[in-house]
Image (cartoon, helix red, strand yellow):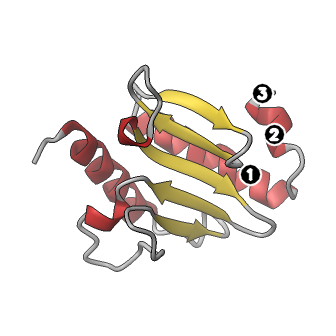
Amino acid sequence: MNIEDFLAAYDPQVQNVCFQLRQLVKELLPDSEEILYEGWKNISYGKGASRSDKDLIVYIAPFKDSVNLGFFRGAILPDPKSLLKGTGKMLRHVKVKSMEDANLDDVKELVVEAKFERLGVR
């Protein structure tokens, strides 16, 4: 299944947010692979042949009326504005209902931090 077919099951507003987040992630992580995980219901981005969680950086997960931009190591990312939500051991996300409501500069900063964390760069 391709990504467009996967997203076709969602509300047009959710699809729009997914496509815009997808573009943002591709711009900020140009060397990352885009991987559709139908079972997890997300589109993940990362680098590495094993495609394990340790190789993944961020994911886009559509829901009924919002989209989560998730971070595989979000629990250890600097988050001075407390944008990241979640209680998992490592996963955190930013809930996006519309791109107009999202603080894109802060979201971009989190994606860049996640990339640096994955590369071990500080």
Residue at 85% x, 54% y: name it.
Answer: 10
On the image, the x and y values in percent for residue 115 come to 30, 43
Three-letter residue code for mark 2: Phe
Residue at 31% x, 50% y: name it.
Answer: 114
In the displayed structure, would residue 9 be above or below residue 46? below
Three-letter residue code for mark 3: Asn
- SS at circle 1: helix
Q: Residues within 10 Å of mark 2 (few under 14, many from 20)?
A: some
Residue at 39% x, 39% y: name it.
Answer: 28
Q: Earlier in the sequence, mark 1 or mark 3?
A: 3
Q: Nearer the viewer, mark 1 or mark 2?
A: 2
Relative to residue 119, is residue 103 drawn left or right?
Answer: right
Q: Residue furthest left?
A: 122
Q: Split into 4 quadrants, where in the image is the N terminus? A: top right
In the displayed structure, would residue 114 be above or below residue 78? above
Is 104 or 85 nearer to us in this picture?
85
Query: Are dots 3 and 2 in contact, CB under 8 Å?
Result: yes
Q: Earlier in the sequence, mark 1 or mark 2?
A: 2
Task: Kindly indicate the quadrant of the structure image that contains residue 61.
Answer: bottom right
Cα distance in 3D space between marks 3 and 2? 6 Å
Relative to residue 48, is residue 25 drawn left or right?
Answer: right
Three-letter residue code for mark 1: Asn
Q: Residues within 10 Å of mark 3 (few under 14, many from 20)?
A: few
| Residue annotated with mark 1 | 16
Residue at 67% x, 50% y: name it.
Answer: 18
Q: Residues within 10 Å of mark 1 (few under 14, many from 20)?
A: some
Q: Which mark is residue 6?
A: 2
On the image, the x and y values in percent for residue 56 come to 42, 39
Cα distance in 3D space between marks 1 and 2? 13 Å
| Residue annotated with mark 3 | 2
Cα distance in 3D space between marks 1 and 3? 16 Å
